[in-house]
Amino acid sequence: MPSDGAAKAKEAMAKRAKKPKNTTLQYYIWIGGAVAALVGAMLLLILNPDKGPFGIPVNDDGLITHVNRNAKTWSADKSSMFNGWTLGDAKMLEGVSVSGQSQPCVVPDTQVPDSFDAREKWPQCFNQPIYSMGNCTASWAVATASALSNRFCISSPSEYADLMLSPQQLLSCDSANRACSGGDVDAVWGYIEREGLVNESCFPYQGDGTVSCQSKCSDGASLRAASHCHLNNEAAIRKEVFLNGPVSAPIFLMDDFLVYSGGLYQEMPTATQLSAANRQRLIHMVKIVGWGSMQGKGYWLIENSWGADWGEGGYAKILAGGDPQAREGIIIETYVLAGTPASGKLGDDADDDIDLEDIDLDLDEGDDE
């Protein structure tokens, strides 16, 4: 028989073996620590944003080197537009919205070439400098005014050569939109159809929504749009641009697109989508002026508003025919906008009547295909 000491030792060991470990308590302690760490990290980012990922410069040497080593169809470089900007600053370019209120375009059926550049077909209409919108969410105004300027020139090259309609007027005078805090790409056309736009020389671009609407020159004649509509597929966009000139298009912003310098842009697998505080992806407006193909892939030729030293002299080639939700391109091809110029110059009286029956409209309501 075992001794009393051995029996007591065995009994103590049995009690220790039966005592369950408090794993639940350990789990909650671990979770609590993780949550505390996460909250601390978030507070650190709020109090010291430069310490977080969005404190990384836009013109980051590491990102540029990474793209140039790994991208197959495009290259990256710094641009003066983003000197001193962080990715956190770029995230502040929010506010461009799409209400979806425009009617679909009717585009005549026509054969289009495999490649096209509106600058080559209508060279007298593309001598204007590239806008640099600065620290102002103004792409909605710049792309819209610029595309309509081109279309006025295309409709009458001798009368409207080198025309530049004022995007600053939209920032300062269009109360339905939000100036440098963004604008609705549909609502902006309502203003242009009612009030028209003066020339850039009458109301120069300042990238400042606080500039008074009264700052535009008093004797400036306005040009109105007669109508606008939207295009919803690649074929319709090509036909419309080929027949009538540039259109304005929304794109989703990616961090690597900010450093694009040439070639056919396709977002890198490592690219980060830029989103607003509400997690909605940032929309930016550009102007489509043509298309083509490179290395067997189709692209849109776009004009941007980030200055002439960004991209290919202010232009870019962006993958066409893709689905942005599947990371197959960044242009939202299902909602591209086209405006029709009204005929003739209009005076300062914005209430002058226009007889739409006397205007030859290329665009009307209905489906393209």
Image: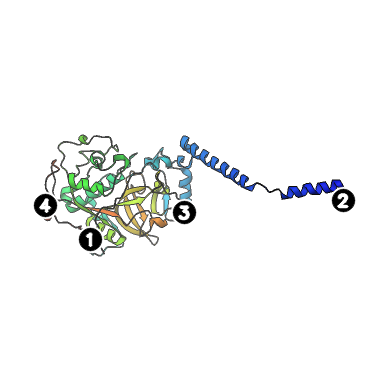
Is residue 162 in view?
no
Res. 355 mark: 4
Q: Mark 3 touching mark 4, by CB under 8 A?
A: no
Mark whose residue sits in front, 3 or 4: 4
Q: CA distance from mark 4 to mark 1?
A: 21 Å
Upstream in the sequence, badge 2 or badge 1?
Answer: 2
Q: CA distance from mark 3 to mark 4?
A: 52 Å
* Tag 2 and tag 3, C-beta contact below 8 Å: no
- Along the line of sight, the residue nearer the viewer: 193 or 219: 193
Query: Residue beneath label 3, please?
Result: 269
- Which of label 2 and label 4 is nearer to you? 2
Helix, strand or loop for disc 4: loop
- What is the x, y in percent for residue 173? 23, 39
The amino acid marked with disc number 4 is Asp
In the rendered image, which residue does mark 1 sit on? 366
Residue at image point 18% right, 53% down: 155
Q: Earlier in the sequence, mark 2 or mark 3?
A: 2
CA gap between label 3 and label 1 equals 38 Å
Question: Which mark sits nearer the N-terminus, 3 or 4?
Answer: 3
Residue 21 can be seen, yes or no? yes
Instruction: Identify residue for label 2.
Output: 2
- Secondary structure under tag 2 reads loop
